[in-house]
Amino acid sequence: MTHEYTTPERAPLDIAFVKRLLDEAGVGPVSVHYSRVTSSTQVEARSLLDAGVQPPFACLTDEQTVGRGRLDRQWFAPSGTSVLMTIALPRPQVLTTLPLQFGVAVAEVLREAGADVRLKWPNDIVFAHGPDLRKVGGIIAEVHGDAVVVGIGINSTMDDAELPTPEATSLSLEGVSAERERIIVGVLSRLHEVPALPLDAYRRLCDTIGRDVRVQQVNGNVVEGRATGVDDDGALLVVSAGRPVRVTSGDVSRLRGSVGP
């Protein structure tokens, strides 16, 4: 699906517009739940599941007070400056690749909007600035009973002073004008495709493959070496000190001097 993107404004989401675009795109069945301000769209999605609301559905907000990203990092953004969304889906048979597949879907939507984004393993959405990467968005997926909740955050119109870290960026700072409503609809329109997306699509967009990297694993171990690929279970393959290492989780950074594939 392609869209004509216009300059975003820091206004509340136009949910009527979102629902109209969903109808026009033939997206369904997926319900949309909107709160002007919420603690976290992930918390809201889990609460709705506990109350018996059946997936698929999406929770949207303009502002989170207790947002959370990967590795329990906090995710704060000024009101109206980000896409903040959690999608609840029936739990698929294969879970390990789902965040990567959502990464592909989100990246494709942003690339349609003119954003030359790539993916940093496992599911950070980034812009390349020479040897450095600037993160514009991220994805986190968690199992909740018979469902999975997928949180998606994208910096839309933040300025330099509002960025959470020097390694971050926003669509507007990269010269990309994209309405939040159209990004949301673009992602939701791909829901039926996501679980079947081949990892070859991820590998084509993955900036990490072919780089010399440092991986800080959750258990405290550090792996340094050349990232050679991503296997069919979504793990990063690294050759370190001449031996292959399979990394299933961790925080990846490029080593200086890495020239890529």
Image: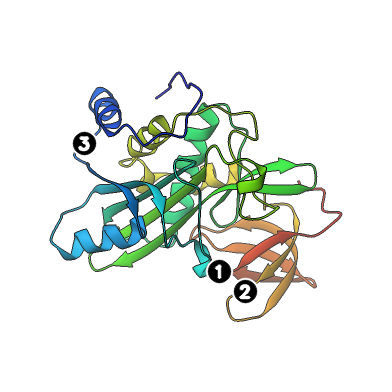
Label whose residue precedes the other's in the sequence (2 or 1): 2
Q: Nearer the viewer, residue 137 or 56?
A: 137
For the N terminus, the quadrant is top left
SS at circle 3:
loop
Residue 131, numbered circle: none
Residue at the disc numbered 2:
217
SS at circle 1:
loop
Residue 72 position in % (x across, y down): 50, 69
Residue 34 position in % (x across, y down): 27, 45
Residue at the disc numbered 1:
249
| 183 over 82 or under it: above or below | above
SS at circle 2:
loop
Residue 238 placement, left or right of 85: right
Dots 3, 2 in contact, CB < 8 A: no
Residue 28, numbered circle: 3
Residue 176 position in % (x across, y down): 59, 29
